[in-house]
Amino acid sequence: MPWFRNLIQISATTFKSQSSLKPIYTKPFVHPFTSQLLQFTTTTAAAADREKLPQEVKANTTRHAGLGPTKGDEKRRVVVLGSGWAGCRLIKDIDTKIYDVVCVSPRNHMVFTPLLASTCVGTLEFRSVAEPIGRIQPAISREPGSFYFLANSTGIDFHNHLVNCQTVTDGADTLEPWNFNIAYDKLVIAAGAEASTFGIKGVKEHAIFLREVHHAQEIRRKLLLNLMLSDVPGVSDEEKRRLLHCVVVGGGPTGVEFSGELSDFIMRDVRQRYAHAKDNIRVTLIEANEILSSFDDRLRVYATKQLIKSGVRLVRGIVKDVQPEKIVLSDGTDVPYGLLVWSTGVGPSPFVKSLDVPKSPGGRIGVDEWLRIPSVPDVFAIGDCCGFLESTGKPVLPALAQVAERQGKYLAKELNRIGKAGGGRANAATDIDLGAPFVYRHLGSMATIGRYKALVDLRQSKEAKGLSVAGFGSWFIWRSAYLTRVISWRNRFYVAINWLTTLIFGRDISRI
Amino acid sequence: MPWFRNLIQISATTFKSQSSLKPIYTKPFVHPFTSQLLQFTTTTAAAADREKLPQEVKANTTRHAGLGPTKGDEKRRVVVLGSGWAGCRLIKDIDTKIYDVVCVSPRNHMVFTPLLASTCVGTLEFRSVAEPIGRIQPAISREPGSFYFLANSTGIDFHNHLVNCQTVTDGADTLEPWNFNIAYDKLVIAAGAEASTFGIKGVKEHAIFLREVHHAQEIRRKLLLNLMLSDVPGVSDEEKRRLLHCVVVGGGPTGVEFSGELSDFIMRDVRQRYAHAKDNIRVTLIEANEILSSFDDRLRVYATKQLIKSGVRLVRGIVKDVQPEKIVLSDGTDVPYGLLVWSTGVGPSPFVKSLDVPKSPGGRIGVDEWLRIPSVPDVFAIGDCCGFLESTGKPVLPALAQVAERQGKYLAKELNRIGKAGGGRANAATDIDLGAPFVYRHLGSMATIGRYKALVDLRQSKEAKGLSVAGFGSWFIWRSAYLTRVISWRNRFYVAINWLTTLIFGRDISRI
């Protein structure tokens, strides 16, 4: 039997010592490429012994393996916490001949957030808006000293230039999360912000945010589930209306774009493919103030008209309570819903709150004009997690992709210059010229509001004069602009293909 | 404020009677299109009262709404249980001028199973292999009397021509599953089979099957998670080898194709994008007998050589026990694994076992040569859930997509003829000529075994003579053959685009 002759026995030697399959922290871990991996072991109890200790004692004696400080003429290490617009732009632009890059983030890709709303209804595929970090900066997967770690940062020891991390195991039952430390020469905090709930009860439990790909997946699954369930015999008309009522809270660009996409989906695809449901499905957008408040008045009026025309109901109201099947407004009105999407802006995350550094107005990490945290050396913050300190006299910038990306680009340049001038090592950049401070220039805002319509506001601020246009032309500009900004050619190609197939074949409605 | 003028108040009248938002079974449900929706209510207790009853009593008094029997000159109703190869082919070919089609299935799409293995490693996208039922048969979403119900069939009342169903709510916490009945004129059971575990402990808990899109998604997430976790400092070499050990149990076409795809992924993509992991990742294929036992000996030798060449370890062994981090073979060998894929064939599902009808050898639903269940009128079975009764003298056909699809095609034709001859109504087809019995002619088998290589066996049976080829030419035939068999143009297009981008840009590695 030829197959049998080729049989490779799984011998006892290949898989010896079965009893110690769990991560072992006592044996120093030898990295196949470099000797940078050191151990921060402080106790000597065997892993097996630790298992018997109660939880608290165990936590204290857990050894931390990790990446030790860079030495001699080794490349210096930039550690980046986060993989959003700010972190990924920095990772892309950093000079990997000067620095090793280590990225710590709970997701191994960047989300192209402006197109996320389109994925909820199948206009775009989920993968088309996700860009793997290894593709943004190939050195991360190729260079021996560069890494991406699927982990959360749990704390920072600024004094010893160390970041504490814990792996994200994401429900995999056979893996316990474990802790490790990373020594940094330069640290960039780009950990982002958290969706605001304003302390309203039930938001986290019952509403879906729209910030990550898995949120969009959840929205899509729920929307299709509700469409299908509403068709089942025995469902009362009232329950049917509830199931098919999609409520969006928050009239910012994300909320408006999602409402627009949803009404497109209803007008074009539901009527064709869920004919039985078409009379009961509705979209309501609830906003406490004005929708698209950062846009030009004229554009806002236009957006309002277009949204109403495509069937979106605009309601001014304040949400008081979120229950499993209804929300309660502050005037006592009950609004039953089948799908609730929450998009009311962002605030500081628990990690940012936990850091013992001066904060900007609004509770973000306070930075100076060079995006440094002034109180600690070699640490920078960019993106939604940071804001100018009051002492700089500058306002805290809005939590926009545009701001974050510009900050990442600026800081990469700054770090590259510092590295070239010999200041890459920890505590070595004290007397190096920092160059011009970071200045943000707003390039304009864009929002799509449904089928072939978009707003483009090219004014630099709300008060300034400048071009603001709306309509089909804007929609075309919007699509082209995004298409050229999606980072890889692969995703540019996929987004174009997705748009084309949606146009020809309609949106995909399989619930997978 | 123009926006404010357009404000539509959510008035109390729109959302009145909040207290009764749950499905109400007491009020007859009025269908907007037809009056076919009737109620099978037998008690009159109000829904509110039922809430107070203990669980068991409640179950007994739950009223069943549903679709009542067709009447007068209404179109007759074919109810199809399942949405696999057999059911979807039937749904596609049925004459919707004669029949209304009602499909009951826990998934709203058909999975193009031969390409499922490719989605696990990102060669193809998940959506490219899923075809929505509404696209296979547009009447389902357009015709007033045709439906797709997201539900499982829980039982059949053959005497009264009724199918009992329960909605699939899939973990949505706000929805209780509810029951309904559907009256049929013709019933087609195409509910498929279940993955065999041979009663081995731990398979269902720890192994992943490869039969649905969500299985492929789970495999991909776990594979990428393990790749990333193996990179974290502090993981011992042993644990790293375990995490990166992918074990496939079952050497049939699915197991072999998945092993081939996985080794391609490792050879091409892991080496480039997970350079740190490339020395520790391995694939082992465990099979108790011979791999690809249905193929020509010469092809089998070729496949074995190719698999070994691309790094797959072939092990002959019988799995005795599956534990969270290792499997135990019958000779006592422990095989630690990070990912375990189980693909050892299929057997009858609990639903099929529960049906009180004569069974074929092997426990499938027994059918005669016209695919009827002889003991009950107007009921047919097709696909993996059925087998010829011993009395027909024919062998039970293998559980192949090819068989299922051919049976669906045959039965659609048969039902169309019966319908045209006036036998569409329940109990009305007793004296109608059934035409030629179903005869299966095997067209040959195909399997891909990794990069640019495939086997094509065009013999009609194992003993017959005929063409059998292997290599690049076969790979080309394989790809072309599948490309033309993917059901919609949209998916044909997407599969071609996916293959092209994988060739140019490599596989997608974002873990979403």
Image (cartoon, coloured by chain):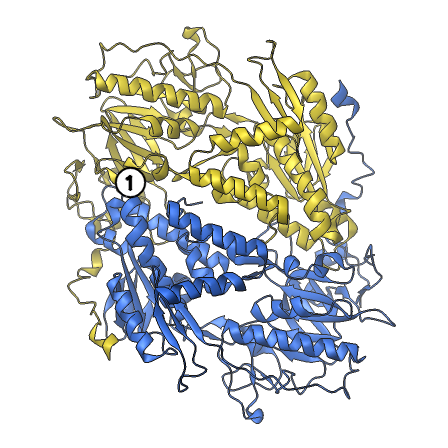
Chain colours: A yellow, B blue
Left or right: residue A264 compared with residue B278: right
In the displayed structure, A126 sits above or below B103; it is: above
Depth check: B97 or A307 in front?
A: B97
Left or right: residue A197 compared with residue A143: right
Using the image, name the chain to which the residue with label 1 belongs: A
Quarter of the image for residue A500 reads: top right
Query: Secondary structure beneath disc 1?
Result: helix
Q: What residue does disc 1 label?
A: A141
Residue found 25% across the figure and 40% down from its top: A142
Crowding near pointer 1: few (<14 within 10 Å), some, many (20+)? Answer: many
Please identify the residue farthest to the left as the structure is shown. A72
Quarter of the image for residue A464 reads: top right
Residue found 37% across the figure and 47% down from its top: B506
Quarter of the image for residue A475 reads: top right
Residue found 20% across the figure and 75% down from its top: A5
In the displayed structure, B246 sits above or below A218; it is: below
Residue found 58% across the figure and 92% down from its top: B392
Depth check: A12 or A261 in front?
A: A261
The picture places residue A305, in percent across and down from the top left corner, at 74, 27
Which image quadrant: the N terminus of chain B?
top right
Q: Is residue B202 visible?
A: no
Left or right: residue A7 compared with residue A105: left
The picture places residue A193, in percent across and down from the top left corner, at 46, 28
The picture places residue B331, in percent across and down from the top left corner, at 24, 75
Q: Is residue A121 visible?
A: yes
The picture places residue B111, in percent across and down from the top left corner, at 53, 62
Give, as a three-letter code, the residue at label 1: Ser
